[in-house]
Image (tube, grey):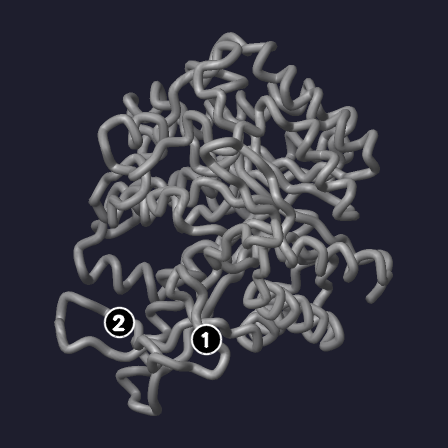
């Protein structure tokens, strides 16, 4: 286990910070989504990290992580999405960064983890090209304040989720259900990434983007299943990986979307040098991985693919999110990425499992299933490294139990158990296991 390999833990602002109205914070699309009843619980309090950040840094220090990936709430910095900077909001991240550095922990901030200012959503949100400019303005404000100390940045987290779950399936904020909206949002998010990268690199920092993946395999040798699996890969993975690495949007997906009326002759959001700007060289790729899928063809002519649910008892089991545990697919996908895109460096920016083990009579949380999951996926990561993939780090999702978006507080991904009634933190067995792993280096 090389010492140069970065081990960390990850969180996001809306899921842990709380303090919704503190110090001039503005309203985000997730605040609104909760207010209109689209979520079982809100992030108004969450894990109260905004007030308990010193305690949380101490827990990270005791854990022994090299790095901490967190996100910055756009609405704390620019409550109206653009314009006047809220210095009090930036003060929080200033204190957090200094606290991490004092503890010997390298900060890896993510600029956008889905919490768009509601003011911008009211103007069209990510379907509006002007939001790209607003994101660059936000990036500049954060970089001016933190760029003298932050040397690693992530522009966006999981653009697929923001674009498709938020604009096509409507299950995430802002809750839209439109193919044109989803495609426009995906393009504008990627374009804002491309334009933000040089702003951050101007300070000499390393910059990446965190793309999530769902590796797909055909459920059978049936040519229809093979074609359906290829289409799923284009929809779920290649639509984002290809343009980031200079290949543009996949031709087969452009044709499929055009043939099905998703857009007309050209994708209307694309203008001028957009694709060149999206393909700006990045210093590392962040990869978020949780599971893989088998895909078959659908008998419904309106549906391009059908995920095949494995049997009730696959050998490696399921997490409580209903996701099959497939660590070997992580190795294979990393090898595929290296062959297809030749990234300069890769970090596993999220990997983890939801299991609801609570505090037992002995005061401990015995979450052996999470330990098994993490051990298998860390091994899979190093297997890919041994096969020549430049994997340089791994972040557990998540540092602590948090608000799992529309799943509320029922799904627990944390190394640290959080009692959401009291805020009490209890390190789980997986926390102690991870600490031993890191100290063994």
- Tell me which corner region of the image, top left, top right, bottom left or bottom right, holds residue 59: top right
Instruction: Classify the position of the C terminus by image quarter.
Output: bottom right
Closer to the chain start, of discs 1 and 2, is: 2
Q: Which mark is residue 305?
A: 2
Instruction: Classify the position of the N terminus by image quarter.
Output: bottom right
Q: Is residue 282 above or below residue 384?
A: above
Q: Residues within 10 Å of mark 2 (few under 14, many from 20)?
A: many
Outermost residue toward the front in this view: 361
Q: Is residue 382 above or below residue 273?
A: below
Q: CA distance from mark 1 to mark 2?
A: 24 Å
- Identify the residue at horizontal 41%, vertical 31% (top origin): 43
Q: Position of residue 36 (x, y in %)?
A: 23, 28
Q: Position of residue 336 (x, y in %)?
A: 57, 72
Judge depth for marks 1 and 2 and give the one in front: 1
Q: Which mark is residue 391?
A: none
| 21 and 372: which is toward the camera | 372
Please name the residue that numbered disc 1 is placed on: 317
> Secondary structure beneath disc 1?
loop
> Secondary structure beneath disc 2?
loop
| 324 and 144: which is toward the camera | 324
- Tell me which corner region of the image, top left, top right, bottom left or bottom right, holds residue 298: bottom left
Q: Position of residue 356 (x, y in %)?
A: 46, 56
């Amino acid at each position: 286990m090389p010492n140069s390999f970065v081990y960390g833990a990850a969180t996001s602002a809306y899921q842990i910070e709380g303090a919704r109205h503190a110090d001039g914070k503005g309203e985000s699309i997730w605040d609104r989504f909760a207010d209109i009843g689209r979520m079982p619980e809100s992030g108004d309090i969450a894990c109260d990290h905004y007030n308990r950040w010193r305690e949380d840094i101490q827990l990270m220090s005791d854990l022994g992580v090299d790095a901490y990936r967190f996100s910055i709430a756009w609405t704390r910095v620019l409550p109206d999405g653009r314009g006047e900077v809220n210095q009090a909001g930036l003060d929080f991240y200033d204190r957090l960064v200094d606290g991490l550095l004092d503890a010997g922990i390298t900060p890896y901030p993510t600029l956008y983890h889905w919490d768009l200012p509601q003011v911008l959503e009211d103007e069209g949100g990510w379907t509006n090209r002007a939001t790209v400019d607003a994101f660059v303005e936000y990036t500049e404000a954060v970089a001016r304040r933190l760029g003298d100390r932050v040397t690693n940045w992530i522009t966006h987290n999981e653009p697929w989720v923001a674009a498709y779950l938020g604009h096509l399936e409507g299950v995430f904020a802002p809750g839209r259900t439109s193919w044109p909206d989803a495609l426009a949002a995906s393009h504008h998010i990627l374009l804002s990434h491309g334009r933000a990268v040089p702003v951050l690199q101007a300070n000499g920092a390393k910059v990446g983007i965190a793309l999530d993946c769902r590796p797909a395999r055909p459920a059978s040798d049936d040519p229809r299943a093979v074609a359906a699996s290829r289409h799923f890969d284009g929809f779920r993975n290649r639509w984002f990986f290809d343009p980031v690495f200079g290949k543009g949007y996949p031709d087969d997906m452009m044709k499929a979307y055009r043939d099905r009326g998703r857009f007309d002759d050209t994708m209307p959001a694309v203008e001028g040098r957009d694709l060149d700007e999206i393909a700006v060289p990045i210093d590392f790729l962040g990869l978020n991985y949780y599971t893989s899928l088998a895909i078959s063809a659908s008998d419904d002519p309106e549906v391009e693919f059908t995920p095949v649910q494995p049997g009730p008892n696959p050998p490696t089991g399921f997490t409580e999110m209903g996701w099959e545990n497939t660590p070997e697919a992580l190795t294979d996908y990393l090898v595929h990425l290296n062959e297809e895109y030749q990234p300069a460096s890769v970090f596993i920016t999220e990997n983890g499992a939801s299991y609801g083990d609570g505090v037992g009579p002995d005061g401990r949380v015995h979450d052996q299933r999470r330990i098994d999951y993490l051990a298998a996926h860390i091994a899979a990561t190093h297997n890919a490294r041994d096969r020549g993939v430049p994997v340089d780090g791994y972040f557990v999702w998540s540092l602590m139990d948090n608000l799992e978006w529309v799943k509320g507080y029922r799904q627990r991904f944390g190394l640290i158990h959080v009692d959401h009634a009291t805020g009490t933190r209890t390190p789980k067995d997986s926390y102690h296991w991870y600490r031993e792993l890191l100290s063994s280096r």
